[in-house]
């Protein structure tokens, strides 16, 4: 079986785990046409009733950012909200293919316009996936992404790296991911048993303490929907994560891998948090884009995720900086500002957003992961059992 076909099979059967008669929505870019076709074929072969592609295109996005106002770029589109509601009611499965065809396409444009987007649509999509829609997000190799990683459009080389990260080089990738997910789930159970009240990340340029919510739950590997069907929201995944108390974060962090925000590459990012809010931002390149991004809404400046990854990660072992946060966040410890995960607290998914906020969960239309780990990172936790070391010098020791 060709690598692209193994990729599609994993996405459909190991990712969203499409069921016979189910509809599938496929968000993809025109740069991913060949891969989108393979995923569509695999979905129908697995019994999908229909597959609806929803296309994006980089040059069209640049035209919009160049000519439309911030207000027009951010405008609510009622028909789009209705479509998302209908997807949820129809119990569709959702696939999103990532992989910037040209990560520098929006360089030089107005940061406020670059950051502008219909936030209500993003919020509606988050409500859908948190409300039970099975979903998976996966990187799709293309020449532009390969050029960003290797300095040349060597797609075969990128496929090899992606194949290693996604376990496509093994005889049965779906079974291999099931096995890996058990390891990650076990780590989550160990963390749950500690009832930690705070987490501290320390490394070169980073000393960040984050408060955790009472009875928060750690998630590792895949999820299971209300019908008991297992799925993998992200492929690859090497993390164990939870949502913190958005009101309790103090310290500084140094981002150790490039970040792409609104289509622009941010390097050398450094962030200060005070009283649970991001108060200072600096970067070697792209600080103004980050500042504009943090103005998206009230929750954009507070943390919505803390995650633990060690050097045993397959992504870390490739030695490749993927310039794609889906991959790079799974190479080392990371945090995210913006939206929390309601399932991180028992029964919180059934609460209203104001009630979730009262618990300490964060609400936002953005969720932006930044890597702060790698060589030298140490993570400790505090709780009723005292201080415990979880990761020491990038190695899981708990």
Image (spheres, rainbow, N blue to C red):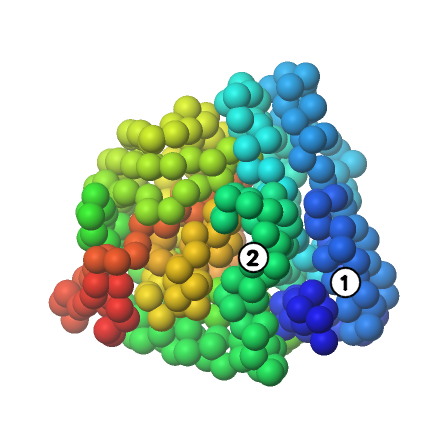
Q: Position of residue 178 (x, y in %)?
A: 54, 79
**Distance Cα–Cα, label 2 vs label 1:** 18 Å
Numbered tag placed on residue 38 in the rendering: 1
Q: Residue furthest right?
A: 49
Residue 267 against residue 378 in the figure, above or below: above
Q: Position of residue 320 (x, y in %)?
A: 43, 56
When asked about the image quadrant of residue 26, the answer is bottom right
When asked about the image quadrant of residue 61, the answer is top right
Residue 13 against residue 78 in the figure, above or below: below
Q: Residue at x 69, y 57 (%)?
A: 94
Judging from the image, what secondary structure is the residue with disc 1 in? helix
Q: Nearer the viewer, residue 206 or 313?
A: 313
Query: Marks 2 and 1: which is nearer the front?
Result: 2
Side of 299 where 308 appears, left or right: left
Q: Position of residue 57 (x, y in %)?
A: 71, 37
Q: Quadrant of the N terminus?
A: bottom right
Side of 19 where 350 appears, left or right: left
Q: Residue at x 59, y 31 (%)?
A: 105
Residue at numbered disc 2: 158
Q: Residue at x 38, y 37 (%)?
A: 267
Q: Are marks 2 and 1 in contact (CB under 8 Å)?
A: no
């Amino acid at each position: 079986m060709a690598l692209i076909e193994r990729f599609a099979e994993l996405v459909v059967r190991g990712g969203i785990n499409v069921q016979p008669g189910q509809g599938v929505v496929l968000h993809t870019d025109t740069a991913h046409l060949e891969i989108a076709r393979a995923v569509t074929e695999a979905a129908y072969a697995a019994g999908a009733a229909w597959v609806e592609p929803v296309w994006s295109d980089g040059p069209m996005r640049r035209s919009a950012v160049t000519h439309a106002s911030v207000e027009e770029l951010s405008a609510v589109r009622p028909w789009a909200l209705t479509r998302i509601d209908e997807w949820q009611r129809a119990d569709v499965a959702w696939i999103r293919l990532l992989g910037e065809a040209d990560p520098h396409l929006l360089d030089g444009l107005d940061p406020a316009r670059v950051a502008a987007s219909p936030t209500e649509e993003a919020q509606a999509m988050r409500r859908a996936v948190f409300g039970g829609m099975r979903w998976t997000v996966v990187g799709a190799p293309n020449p532009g992404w390969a050029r960003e990683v290797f300095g040349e459009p060597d797609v075969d080389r990128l496929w090899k790296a992606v194949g290693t990260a996604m376990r496509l080089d093994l005889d049965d990738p779906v079974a291999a991911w099931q096995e890996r997910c058990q390891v990650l789930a076990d780590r989550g159970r160990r963390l749950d048993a500690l009832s930690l009240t705070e987490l501290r990340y320390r490394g070169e340029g980073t000393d960040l303490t984050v408060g955790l919510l009472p009875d928060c739950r750690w998630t590792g590997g895949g999820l299971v929907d209300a019908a008991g069907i297992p799925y993998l929201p992200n492929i690859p995944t090497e993390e164990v994560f939870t949502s913190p108390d958005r009101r309790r974060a103090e310290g500084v962090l140094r981002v150790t891998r490039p970040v792409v925000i609104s289509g622009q590459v941010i390097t050398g990012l450094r962030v200060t948090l005070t009283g649970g809010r991001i108060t200072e931002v600096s970067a070697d390149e792209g600080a103004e884009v980050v500042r504009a991004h943090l103005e998206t809404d009230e929750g954009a400046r507070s943390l919505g995720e803390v995650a633990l990854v060690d050097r045993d990660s397959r992504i870390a072992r490739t030695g490749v900086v993927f310039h794609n946060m889906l991959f790079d966040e799974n190479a080392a410890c990371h945090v995210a500002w913006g939206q929390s995960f309601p399932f991180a607290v028992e029964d919180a998914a059934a609460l209203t957003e104001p009630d979730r906020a009262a618990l300490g969960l964060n609400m936002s239309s953005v969720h932006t992961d930044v890597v702060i780990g790698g060589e030298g990172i140490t993570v400790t936790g505090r709780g009723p059992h005292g201080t415990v070391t979880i990761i020491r010098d990038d190695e899981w020791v708990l």
